[in-house]
Image (cartoon, rainbow, N blue to C red):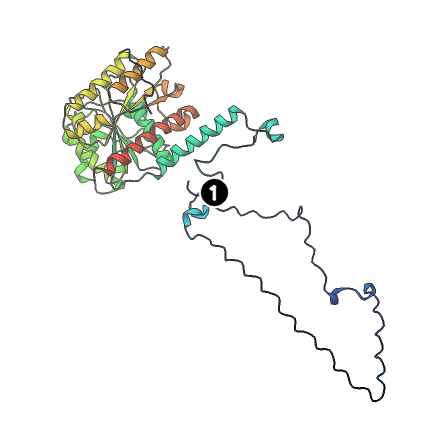
Amino acid sequence: MTDKISDVFGAAARAEDYLEEDTTSVAPHLVPRTRNETPAEVLPALPPMPKSPVRPEGAPVQPEPVLAAVPPAPKTPAEAPVERSRDKSLSVLFGGAASGMTPTSTAPTKSTKGLRGLLRLAPSPAELAEHEHRARGLANETIIRQATWTRHVRILLANKKGGTGKTPLSILLGGVIAAIKGGSVAIWEVSDDPGALNFRAEGNPTLGLGELVRDVDTITSAGQLAGYGVPQTSFATVFGTVGPRAALAGEDVVKVSDKIGEFYGIEVMDSGNVPTSPAFQGAVSVADILVIPVMNSGDSVLQAIEVLEELRNGNDHAKALAANAIAVRLKDGRPESPAVAEEVARLLHDAGVTQLHDVPYDAHIAERGQLTVGKLTPATRDALAAAAAGVVRSLQTIVSTKR
Protein backbone atom coordinates (compact mmCIF):
# COMPACT_ATOMS: atom_id res chain seq x y z
CA MET A 1 0.00 0.00 0.00
CA THR A 2 2.97 2.31 -0.39
CA ASP A 3 2.42 2.89 -4.08
CA LYS A 4 1.54 6.47 -4.97
CA ILE A 5 -0.78 7.50 -7.71
CA SER A 6 -0.26 10.64 -9.75
CA ASP A 7 -3.86 11.22 -10.69
CA VAL A 8 -6.52 9.55 -8.66
CA PHE A 9 -9.74 11.09 -9.61
CA GLY A 10 -10.56 12.77 -11.77
CA ALA A 11 -20.27 26.83 -26.34
CA ALA A 12 -22.85 27.26 -27.41
CA ALA A 13 -21.90 29.88 -30.04
CA ARG A 14 -21.95 33.48 -28.87
CA ALA A 15 -24.99 35.52 -29.79
CA GLU A 16 -24.32 38.54 -31.97
CA ASP A 17 -23.89 41.65 -29.86
CA TYR A 18 -26.45 44.33 -30.51
CA LEU A 19 -24.92 47.58 -29.19
CA GLU A 20 -26.78 50.85 -29.35
CA GLU A 21 -24.60 53.81 -30.15
CA ASP A 22 -24.35 56.51 -27.54
CA THR A 23 -25.60 59.49 -29.49
CA THR A 24 -24.17 61.93 -26.97
CA SER A 25 -20.63 60.91 -27.79
CA VAL A 26 -20.86 60.43 -31.55
CA ALA A 27 -19.93 63.27 -33.89
CA PRO A 28 -22.82 64.45 -36.09
CA HIS A 29 -22.88 63.12 -39.61
CA LEU A 30 -22.46 66.04 -42.01
CA VAL A 31 -24.45 65.90 -45.25
CA PRO A 32 -23.54 68.34 -48.06
CA ARG A 33 -26.28 70.78 -48.90
CA THR A 34 -27.84 70.77 -52.32
CA ARG A 35 -28.07 73.98 -54.32
CA ASN A 36 -31.69 74.64 -53.54
CA GLU A 37 -30.93 74.30 -49.81
CA THR A 38 -28.24 77.03 -49.86
CA PRO A 39 -29.49 80.43 -48.70
CA ALA A 40 -29.63 83.02 -51.47
CA GLU A 41 -27.41 85.49 -49.65
CA VAL A 42 -24.46 83.14 -49.73
CA LEU A 43 -24.72 82.23 -53.43
CA PRO A 44 -21.71 83.50 -55.43
CA ALA A 45 -22.41 86.13 -58.05
CA LEU A 46 -22.71 84.65 -61.51
CA PRO A 47 -20.43 86.08 -64.21
CA PRO A 48 -22.23 87.94 -67.02
CA MET A 49 -23.23 85.78 -69.94
CA PRO A 50 -20.95 86.44 -72.92
CA LYS A 51 -22.65 88.05 -75.89
CA SER A 52 -22.94 85.93 -79.01
CA PRO A 53 -20.68 87.21 -81.74
CA VAL A 54 -22.48 88.91 -84.60
CA ARG A 55 -22.40 86.74 -87.67
CA PRO A 56 -21.53 88.80 -90.78
CA GLU A 57 -24.23 88.87 -93.36
CA GLY A 58 -23.83 86.07 -95.82
CA ALA A 59 -21.52 84.06 -93.61
CA PRO A 60 -22.33 80.36 -93.40
CA VAL A 61 -24.18 79.20 -90.38
CA GLN A 62 -21.90 77.26 -88.07
CA PRO A 63 -23.51 74.14 -86.67
CA GLU A 64 -23.85 73.94 -82.94
CA PRO A 65 -21.23 71.73 -81.36
CA VAL A 66 -22.49 68.32 -80.56
CA LEU A 67 -21.76 67.24 -77.02
CA ALA A 68 -20.58 63.73 -76.66
CA ALA A 69 -22.94 61.59 -74.67
CA VAL A 70 -21.62 61.04 -71.17
CA PRO A 71 -21.56 57.35 -70.41
CA PRO A 72 -23.60 56.52 -67.33
CA ALA A 73 -21.62 56.02 -64.17
CA PRO A 74 -21.02 52.36 -63.45
CA LYS A 75 -23.50 51.04 -60.97
CA THR A 76 -22.09 50.23 -57.60
CA PRO A 77 -22.61 46.54 -57.00
CA ALA A 78 -25.20 45.99 -54.36
CA GLU A 79 -23.90 44.73 -51.06
CA ALA A 80 -24.35 41.07 -50.52
CA PRO A 81 -27.23 40.48 -48.15
CA VAL A 82 -26.14 39.75 -44.62
CA GLU A 83 -26.74 36.11 -43.88
CA ARG A 84 -28.46 35.76 -40.52
CA SER A 85 -28.59 32.30 -39.11
CA ARG A 86 -32.01 30.92 -38.33
CA ASP A 87 -30.51 28.58 -35.75
CA LYS A 88 -32.33 29.66 -32.60
CA SER A 89 -29.57 28.16 -30.47
CA LEU A 90 -27.39 31.15 -31.39
CA SER A 91 -29.77 33.62 -29.84
CA VAL A 92 -29.99 34.37 -26.15
CA LEU A 93 -33.71 34.88 -26.72
CA PHE A 94 -34.02 31.14 -27.21
CA GLY A 95 -31.68 30.00 -24.48
CA GLY A 96 -28.45 30.33 -26.42
CA ALA A 97 -25.30 31.67 -24.89
CA ALA A 98 -24.50 35.34 -24.87
CA SER A 99 -21.27 37.00 -23.96
CA GLY A 100 -20.61 36.51 -20.28
CA MET A 101 -23.50 34.07 -19.85
CA THR A 102 -21.80 30.80 -20.69
CA PRO A 103 -20.05 28.53 -18.19
CA THR A 104 -17.17 28.19 -20.65
CA SER A 105 -16.57 31.94 -20.96
CA THR A 106 -12.93 32.95 -21.05
CA ALA A 107 -11.18 34.63 -18.17
CA PRO A 108 -11.47 38.43 -18.06
CA THR A 109 -8.55 40.41 -19.45
CA LYS A 110 -9.31 43.48 -17.33
CA SER A 111 -9.96 43.68 -13.63
CA THR A 112 -13.39 44.77 -12.45
CA LYS A 113 -12.57 45.28 -8.78
CA GLY A 114 -10.99 47.97 -6.65
CA LEU A 115 -8.08 50.08 -7.79
CA ARG A 116 -7.08 47.54 -10.42
CA GLY A 117 -10.50 47.85 -12.00
CA LEU A 118 -10.37 51.65 -11.88
CA LEU A 119 -7.00 51.63 -13.61
CA ARG A 120 -8.15 48.95 -16.06
CA LEU A 121 -5.28 46.66 -15.10
CA ALA A 122 -5.13 42.92 -15.60
CA PRO A 123 -7.04 40.92 -12.98
CA SER A 124 -5.15 39.68 -9.96
CA PRO A 125 -4.55 35.95 -9.42
CA ALA A 126 -7.24 35.98 -6.72
CA GLU A 127 -9.75 37.53 -9.11
CA LEU A 128 -8.90 34.99 -11.81
CA ALA A 129 -9.34 32.16 -9.30
CA GLU A 130 -12.71 33.57 -8.28
CA HIS A 131 -13.79 33.74 -11.92
CA GLU A 132 -12.74 30.13 -12.49
CA HIS A 133 -14.61 29.06 -9.36
CA ARG A 134 -17.80 30.75 -10.56
CA ALA A 135 -17.41 29.21 -14.00
CA ARG A 136 -17.07 25.71 -12.52
CA GLY A 137 -20.09 26.27 -10.31
CA LEU A 138 -22.18 27.44 -13.25
CA ALA A 139 -21.04 24.45 -15.30
CA ASN A 140 -22.02 22.03 -12.51
CA GLU A 141 -25.45 23.63 -12.14
CA THR A 142 -25.99 23.48 -15.90
CA ILE A 143 -25.14 19.77 -15.97
CA ILE A 144 -27.60 19.03 -13.17
CA ARG A 145 -30.39 21.26 -14.42
CA GLN A 146 -30.35 20.07 -18.02
CA ALA A 147 -29.93 16.34 -17.36
CA THR A 148 -32.81 14.23 -18.65
CA TRP A 149 -33.61 10.54 -18.89
CA THR A 150 -36.37 8.51 -20.47
CA ARG A 151 -37.26 7.02 -17.08
CA HIS A 152 -36.72 7.80 -13.43
CA VAL A 153 -33.30 7.06 -11.95
CA ARG A 154 -32.20 5.76 -8.54
CA ILE A 155 -29.16 6.76 -6.48
CA LEU A 156 -28.17 4.42 -3.63
CA LEU A 157 -25.99 5.60 -0.72
CA ALA A 158 -24.26 2.79 1.15
CA ASN A 159 -21.43 2.02 3.57
CA LYS A 160 -21.30 -0.77 6.13
CA LYS A 161 -19.79 1.62 8.66
CA GLY A 162 -22.30 3.66 10.65
CA GLY A 163 -21.63 7.34 11.25
CA THR A 164 -20.06 7.98 7.85
CA GLY A 165 -22.73 10.45 6.78
CA LYS A 166 -25.12 8.31 4.72
CA THR A 167 -28.26 10.02 6.00
CA PRO A 168 -26.97 13.64 5.94
CA LEU A 169 -25.50 13.13 2.49
CA SER A 170 -28.75 11.58 1.23
CA ILE A 171 -30.70 14.65 2.33
CA LEU A 172 -28.15 17.18 1.12
CA LEU A 173 -27.17 15.54 -2.16
CA GLY A 174 -30.81 15.01 -3.07
CA GLY A 175 -31.65 18.50 -1.81
CA VAL A 176 -29.02 20.20 -3.95
CA ILE A 177 -30.20 18.33 -7.04
CA ALA A 178 -33.82 19.26 -6.28
CA ALA A 179 -32.93 22.89 -5.64
CA ILE A 180 -31.15 23.17 -8.99
CA LYS A 181 -33.70 21.17 -11.01
CA GLY A 182 -36.71 22.65 -9.23
CA GLY A 183 -37.99 19.49 -7.57
CA SER A 184 -38.91 15.96 -8.71
CA VAL A 185 -36.50 14.37 -6.21
CA ALA A 186 -37.62 11.85 -3.57
CA ILE A 187 -35.31 10.90 -0.70
CA TRP A 188 -36.33 7.80 1.18
CA GLU A 189 -35.19 5.16 3.63
CA VAL A 190 -34.24 1.67 2.48
CA SER A 191 -32.73 0.44 5.75
CA ASP A 192 -34.13 -2.79 7.17
CA ASP A 193 -34.87 -1.11 10.52
CA PRO A 194 -35.97 2.52 11.06
CA GLY A 195 -33.14 4.97 10.58
CA ALA A 196 -32.54 8.67 11.31
CA LEU A 197 -33.80 10.07 8.00
CA ASN A 198 -37.00 11.45 9.52
CA PHE A 199 -35.07 13.15 12.32
CA ARG A 200 -32.52 14.82 10.05
CA ALA A 201 -35.06 16.04 7.47
CA GLU A 202 -37.18 19.17 7.82
CA GLY A 203 -40.74 18.92 9.05
CA ASN A 204 -42.80 16.66 11.30
CA PRO A 205 -44.95 14.35 9.16
CA THR A 206 -47.76 12.27 10.56
CA LEU A 207 -47.38 9.41 8.05
CA GLY A 208 -44.20 7.83 6.83
CA LEU A 209 -42.53 4.87 5.21
CA GLY A 210 -44.26 2.20 7.29
CA GLU A 211 -47.68 3.50 6.24
CA LEU A 212 -46.47 3.90 2.65
CA VAL A 213 -45.44 0.23 2.52
CA ARG A 214 -48.84 -0.72 3.92
CA ASP A 215 -50.82 1.37 1.41
CA VAL A 216 -48.55 1.28 -1.64
CA ASP A 217 -50.98 -0.79 -3.73
CA THR A 218 -53.81 1.72 -3.21
CA ILE A 219 -51.91 4.85 -4.28
CA THR A 220 -52.89 6.09 -7.72
CA SER A 221 -52.03 9.80 -7.70
CA ALA A 222 -49.26 12.22 -6.76
CA GLY A 223 -51.56 13.80 -4.21
CA GLN A 224 -52.02 10.50 -2.40
CA LEU A 225 -48.30 9.77 -2.39
CA ALA A 226 -47.49 13.25 -1.06
CA GLY A 227 -49.38 12.45 2.13
CA TYR A 228 -46.66 10.00 3.19
CA GLY A 229 -43.73 12.38 2.72
CA VAL A 230 -42.63 15.79 3.91
CA PRO A 231 -41.60 18.62 1.53
CA GLN A 232 -38.22 20.24 2.06
CA THR A 233 -37.26 23.84 1.41
CA SER A 234 -34.92 22.45 -1.26
CA PHE A 235 -38.04 21.22 -3.18
CA ALA A 236 -37.15 17.59 -2.47
CA THR A 237 -39.58 15.27 -0.65
CA VAL A 238 -38.45 12.96 2.16
CA PHE A 239 -40.14 9.64 2.99
CA GLY A 240 -38.82 8.59 6.39
CA THR A 241 -40.08 6.45 9.22
CA VAL A 242 -42.64 7.88 11.65
CA GLY A 243 -42.94 5.66 14.72
CA PRO A 244 -42.35 1.88 14.76
CA ARG A 245 -42.51 -0.16 11.58
CA ALA A 246 -41.75 -3.68 10.49
CA ALA A 247 -38.42 -4.50 8.91
CA LEU A 248 -38.38 -3.77 5.20
CA ALA A 249 -38.33 -6.74 2.87
CA GLY A 250 -36.70 -6.67 -0.53
CA GLU A 251 -40.13 -6.80 -2.18
CA ASP A 252 -41.22 -3.77 -0.14
CA VAL A 253 -38.28 -1.73 -1.40
CA VAL A 254 -38.95 -2.63 -5.03
CA LYS A 255 -42.67 -1.85 -4.82
CA VAL A 256 -42.16 1.49 -3.06
CA SER A 257 -39.39 2.44 -5.47
CA ASP A 258 -41.60 1.71 -8.46
CA LYS A 259 -44.45 3.74 -6.96
CA ILE A 260 -42.21 6.71 -6.19
CA GLY A 261 -40.84 6.47 -9.72
CA GLU A 262 -44.32 7.07 -11.14
CA PHE A 263 -44.30 10.61 -9.74
CA TYR A 264 -40.63 11.58 -9.24
CA GLY A 265 -37.76 11.71 -11.70
CA ILE A 266 -34.97 10.95 -9.22
CA GLU A 267 -34.83 8.75 -6.13
CA VAL A 268 -32.11 9.00 -3.48
CA MET A 269 -32.07 5.90 -1.26
CA ASP A 270 -30.58 6.05 2.24
CA SER A 271 -29.49 2.52 3.19
CA GLY A 272 -28.61 0.87 6.48
CA ASN A 273 -25.45 -0.83 7.67
CA VAL A 274 -26.20 -4.44 6.70
CA PRO A 275 -25.46 -5.13 3.00
CA THR A 276 -26.73 -8.70 3.37
CA SER A 277 -30.21 -7.62 4.56
CA PRO A 278 -33.22 -8.13 2.26
CA ALA A 279 -33.88 -4.37 2.20
CA PHE A 280 -30.35 -3.62 1.00
CA GLN A 281 -30.49 -6.36 -1.61
CA GLY A 282 -33.79 -4.97 -2.87
CA ALA A 283 -32.26 -1.51 -3.15
CA VAL A 284 -29.27 -2.90 -5.03
CA SER A 285 -31.58 -4.63 -7.51
CA VAL A 286 -33.17 -1.33 -8.58
CA ALA A 287 -30.31 1.16 -8.08
CA ASP A 288 -28.63 2.80 -11.07
CA ILE A 289 -25.58 4.21 -9.31
CA LEU A 290 -23.83 3.76 -5.97
CA VAL A 291 -22.55 6.68 -3.87
CA ILE A 292 -20.31 5.77 -0.93
CA PRO A 293 -19.96 8.30 1.91
CA VAL A 294 -16.60 8.04 3.69
CA MET A 295 -14.57 9.87 6.31
CA ASN A 296 -10.81 10.25 6.59
CA SER A 297 -10.53 7.18 8.79
CA GLY A 298 -9.41 3.61 8.32
CA ASP A 299 -12.62 1.88 9.43
CA SER A 300 -14.75 4.10 7.21
CA VAL A 301 -12.82 3.39 4.03
CA LEU A 302 -12.16 -0.29 4.71
CA GLN A 303 -15.82 -1.09 5.29
CA ALA A 304 -16.72 0.91 2.17
CA ILE A 305 -14.34 -1.31 0.21
CA GLU A 306 -16.01 -4.37 1.70
CA VAL A 307 -19.32 -3.23 0.20
CA LEU A 308 -17.67 -2.97 -3.21
CA GLU A 309 -16.18 -6.45 -2.87
CA GLU A 310 -19.54 -7.96 -1.95
CA LEU A 311 -21.16 -6.30 -4.95
CA ARG A 312 -18.47 -7.67 -7.24
CA ASN A 313 -19.36 -11.15 -6.02
CA GLY A 314 -22.98 -10.62 -7.03
CA ASN A 315 -24.78 -10.61 -10.37
CA ASP A 316 -23.92 -8.46 -13.38
CA HIS A 317 -26.07 -5.58 -12.15
CA ALA A 318 -24.33 -5.52 -8.77
CA LYS A 319 -20.94 -5.68 -10.47
CA ALA A 320 -21.87 -2.68 -12.60
CA LEU A 321 -22.77 -0.70 -9.46
CA ALA A 322 -19.34 -1.44 -8.01
CA ALA A 323 -17.61 -0.54 -11.27
CA ASN A 324 -19.24 2.90 -11.41
CA ALA A 325 -19.20 3.75 -7.69
CA ILE A 326 -18.59 7.34 -6.62
CA ALA A 327 -17.17 8.28 -3.21
CA VAL A 328 -17.96 11.46 -1.27
CA ARG A 329 -15.65 12.29 1.62
CA LEU A 330 -17.13 14.37 4.44
CA LYS A 331 -15.37 16.05 7.34
CA ASP A 332 -16.88 16.16 10.81
CA GLY A 333 -14.44 18.54 12.44
CA ARG A 334 -12.15 16.01 14.08
CA PRO A 335 -8.39 16.46 13.57
CA GLU A 336 -7.22 14.80 10.38
CA SER A 337 -3.83 13.73 9.15
CA PRO A 338 -2.84 14.58 5.56
CA ALA A 339 -1.16 11.18 5.35
CA VAL A 340 -4.41 9.44 6.32
CA ALA A 341 -6.38 11.49 3.79
CA GLU A 342 -3.91 10.52 1.07
CA GLU A 343 -4.11 6.87 2.04
CA VAL A 344 -7.93 6.94 1.97
CA ALA A 345 -7.83 8.35 -1.55
CA ARG A 346 -5.33 5.71 -2.64
CA LEU A 347 -7.34 2.82 -1.19
CA LEU A 348 -10.51 4.00 -2.87
CA HIS A 349 -8.71 4.33 -6.18
CA ASP A 350 -7.27 0.86 -5.90
CA ALA A 351 -10.76 -0.44 -5.12
CA GLY A 352 -12.01 0.90 -8.46
CA VAL A 353 -13.61 4.17 -7.34
CA THR A 354 -13.10 6.64 -10.19
CA GLN A 355 -14.55 9.77 -8.57
CA LEU A 356 -13.79 11.14 -5.11
CA HIS A 357 -15.50 14.37 -4.07
CA ASP A 358 -14.60 16.24 -0.89
CA VAL A 359 -17.17 18.13 1.19
CA PRO A 360 -15.69 20.53 3.76
CA TYR A 361 -16.63 20.70 7.40
CA ASP A 362 -19.92 22.50 7.98
CA ALA A 363 -21.20 23.37 11.44
CA HIS A 364 -24.81 22.98 10.28
CA ILE A 365 -24.18 19.32 9.42
CA ALA A 366 -22.20 18.73 12.60
CA GLU A 367 -25.11 19.96 14.75
CA ARG A 368 -26.90 16.66 14.01
CA GLY A 369 -30.26 18.38 13.78
CA GLN A 370 -32.68 18.98 10.94
CA LEU A 371 -30.82 19.79 7.75
CA THR A 372 -31.63 22.71 5.48
CA VAL A 373 -29.69 23.21 2.26
CA GLY A 374 -30.04 26.98 2.56
CA LYS A 375 -28.16 26.96 5.89
CA LEU A 376 -25.04 25.38 4.46
CA THR A 377 -21.98 27.49 3.78
CA PRO A 378 -21.37 28.46 0.14
CA ALA A 379 -18.29 26.22 0.07
CA THR A 380 -20.35 23.22 1.20
CA ARG A 381 -23.09 23.89 -1.35
CA ASP A 382 -20.52 24.22 -4.13
CA ALA A 383 -18.84 20.95 -3.11
CA LEU A 384 -22.19 19.13 -3.02
CA ALA A 385 -23.11 20.55 -6.43
CA ALA A 386 -19.80 19.27 -7.83
CA ALA A 387 -20.51 15.81 -6.40
CA ALA A 388 -24.08 15.88 -7.73
CA ALA A 389 -22.83 16.88 -11.18
CA GLY A 390 -20.45 13.91 -11.12
CA VAL A 391 -23.32 11.59 -10.22
CA VAL A 392 -25.52 13.05 -12.95
CA ARG A 393 -22.82 12.72 -15.61
CA SER A 394 -22.35 9.06 -14.73
CA LEU A 395 -26.09 8.45 -14.69
CA GLN A 396 -26.48 9.86 -18.18
CA THR A 397 -23.98 7.31 -19.43
CA ILE A 398 -25.19 4.39 -17.35
CA VAL A 399 -28.91 4.76 -17.98
CA SER A 400 -28.54 5.44 -21.69
CA THR A 401 -26.70 2.15 -22.12
CA LYS A 402 -29.44 0.20 -20.35
CA ARG A 403 -32.58 1.24 -22.20
Q: Name the side, left or right, on which 163 lies relative to 49.
A: left
Q: In terms of image quadrants, where is residue 151?
A: top left
Q: In terms of image quadrants, where is residue 40?
A: bottom right
User: For the view shown, which residue lies furthest in the front direction?
Assistant: 59
| Residue found 20% across the figure and 18% down from its top | 306
Q: Which of the two residues, 353 or 70, is positioned nearer the viewer here?
A: 70
Residue 147 x/y as whole percent:
32, 38
| Residue found 52% across the figure and 26% down from its top | 127
Q: Name the side, left or right, on which 54 lies relative to 196.
A: right
* Amino acid type for the residue under numbered disc 1: Ala
Q: Which of the two residues, 379 or 347, is positioned nearer the viewer here?
A: 347
Q: Which residue is identified by label 1?
A: 98
Residue 391 x/y as whole percent:
30, 30
Q: Name the side, left or right, on which 100 lies relative to 308.
A: right
Residue 198 x/y as whole percent:
28, 26
Quadrant the N terminus occupies: top left
Q: Secondary structure at mark 1?
A: loop
Q: Which of the two residues, 49 or 291, is positioned nearer the viewer here?
A: 49
Res. 336 visible in picture: no
